[in-house]
Amino acid sequence: MITTPRVLVVDDHRKIREPLAVYLRRQGFDVRTAENAAAMWLLLKRLSFEIVILDVMLPDGDGMELCQQLQRRTHIPVILLTARDATDDRVRGLDFGADDYVVKPFEPRELVARINSVLRRSAFGAVTVPADEAAVLLAYRFAGLHFLPSTGLLSSDEGSGIALSTMEGRLLVAFLNHPNTVLSRDRLIDLCVSPGNDIFDRAIDRQVSRLRGKLAHFLRDREVLITVWGSGYRLAADVSEMRT
């Protein structure tokens, strides 16, 4: 049984927030709304969400920083809404952990397509829960580490763990699905970024660097994420899949 995706729309403009919520409900989503950051955190304490649609400009918080906090605290995918269409803003949004970026004014159908794309790439889209048995979750084991995509938790055999951001998790899954294979920046963009999102090579480089730093937290004397100059990156490790 697949449950209805629950979406949180956070925007201080009622004329955007409420019609968007109505439209998304008509598309089959379970929608809650918040007019500011404070209301968003209250809802997140009470309910679980599969995705957050977050306005960049809120009266009580910067959407970019809030996105980063969401990644650290909840690992919920985030789509940013903004009136700014500059390339630097798009790259900055990705750096802060956003999964996608939609510029106002936008076509609601486009937002729905992007929501579905993000959900397909997230644990919600990847895991089907049988009605009469516990959910079976995919996990990866490599280089003495474990990664559970559904939670974004990277852990060692000793049990210590660290949370990856959504983009870091996507990158790691891309490498884990193609071990000992050189993946170019363009290929990583295809595997990890929603279609139509204007992401440049330098943004992927920064995300790979951050992922490498988190791997180094456990593998201080071993580098498994190798830079292949002029070609891309390679995960130098054997990978096995497990069901938990």
Image (spheres, grey):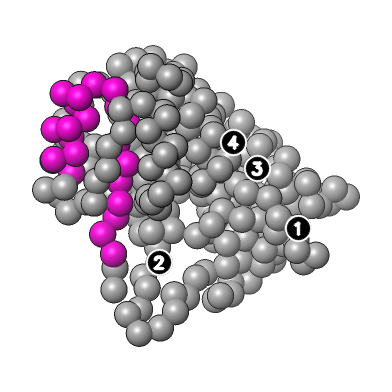
Question: Which quarter of the rendering shows the C terminus?
Answer: bottom right
Amino acid carrying label 4: it is Gln
Instruction: Write down the residue under mark 1.
Output: 160
Tell me, yes or no, whether the two marked residues, 2 and 4, touch with CB atoms within 8 Å. Answer: no
Instruction: Write down the residue under mark 2.
Output: 127
- Could you say whether the residue bearing mark 2 is in a helix, strand or loop? loop
Of tags 3 and 1, the one toward the viewer is 1
Amino acid carrying label 2: it is Val
Of tags 2 and 1, the one toward the viewer is 1
- Could you say whether the residue bearing mark 4 is in a helix, strand or loop? helix
Between 71 and 242, the one lying in front of the other is 71
Q: Residue 211 — which label?
A: 3
Amino acid carrying label 3: it is Leu
Q: Residues within 10 Å of mark 1 (few under 14, many from 20)?
A: few
Instruction: Write down the residue under mark 4.
Output: 207
Amino acid carrying label 1: it is Ser
